[in-house]
Image: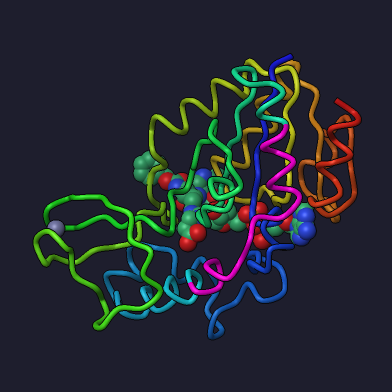
Amino acid sequence: MKLAVLTGAGISAESGVPTFRGQGGLWKSYRPEELATPQAFRRNPALVWEWYLWRRSVIAKAEPNAGHIALVELERKYTENFLLITQNVDGLHQRAGSKRLVELHGNIWRVKCLSCGVVYYDYSVSYAQLPPACKECGGLIRPDVVWFGEALPEDALELAIRWARSCDVFVVIGTSAVVYPAGELPYLAKEHGAKVIEINPESTPVSPIADVIIREPASSGVKKLLEVL
Ligand code: BV8
Ligand code: ZN
């Protein structure tokens, strides 16, 4: 059986990482869509960096939860018949031990230089000056995440689409599925005959096409998944 899993901010909620649309999603009354754009960064790179450093400081205090860990068990069980596709930039899946992982929207702990183009991991939660400078050339660096209006990494998106089209079971965990093209994947899987399973304490646009709904938080819901698979 070929199994693909799509996760969103909900799987990290029980680790203390605020979701986008839930309580605490707002930062200084800015909506994420206002700060996570190339225009916002061009206008005020220091402000956008302040937001990412705030999120890094919250994520740095967080630990992967039972939901993240149960997905590592699934990966061990299904090995090459398993793929984890995440919209999250928090890196908690990696910290839990997930290997067969595709990051659709980048990673908050990676930076990219707008001058020399170098990409590197940087675990700072504060910088002497904002915006911070590139360690290679001193140029302006940005978080290596996908902002609204920007294309997703081609190879990651292609792999996610290929698995959505060819999997037997497509599991959707902790996402409101309103951001595209990630939000399209469950429908693609359904169209190609996959069984769609949703784990989310609330209903979402995916609920009507789900064959199985586990209306629970991820920490307990993913464990239930191990039973229904
Ligand atoms: C692009 C990285 C074009 C940055 C992010 C089609 C239709 C409509 C609009 C569009 C469309 N196609 C494109 C668009 C525009 C746009 C878009 O989708 N807009 C939305 C708002 C309508 N998409 C884009 O701009 C994309 N790019 O289209 O480029 C292009 C193409 C080629 C060439 C050039 C350009 C880029 C989208 C990616 C943006 N970056 N993140 C950062 O993080 O700072 S998106 C970001 O928001 C997240 O990554 C995630 O994807 C999304 C948040 O959603 P969720 O993760 O689902 O979180 P949310 O809070 O919404 O929901 C949480 C859920 O968890 C809830 O359901 C809740 O009930 C549940 N929950 C809560 N607690 C728990 C739980 N579940 C389980 N357990 C719990 N304990
Ligand atoms: Zn540089």
Tell me the quarter of the picture where residue 197 sits: top right
Q: Is residue 32 above or below residue 112?
A: below
x, y (%) of residue 213?
Answer: 89, 39
Identified at 81% across, 40% down, the residue is: 198
**Corner quadrant of residue 18:** bottom right
- Name the spot of residue 111 as percent of width and height, x first: 31, 57
Please say which color scheme the image uses.
Answer: rainbow
Residue farthest to the left? Answer: 137
Residue for point 54% across, 26% down: 161
| Residue numbers of the magenta segment | 57-73
Q: Of residues 77 and 158, which is closer to you in this image?
A: 77
**Can residue 46 be found in the magenta stretch?**
no
What's the magenta bit mostly, secondary-structure-wise?
helix
Residue at point 56% right, 73% down? 58
Residue 69 among those drawn in magenta = yes
- Residue 48 sits above or below residue 223 on the image: below
Residue 220 horizontal side relative to residue 94, left or right: right
Which quadrant of the figure contains the N terminus? top right
From the top left corner, tell me how far across and down residue 128 is, in percent.
26, 83
Quadrant of the rendered image holding ligand 2: bottom left
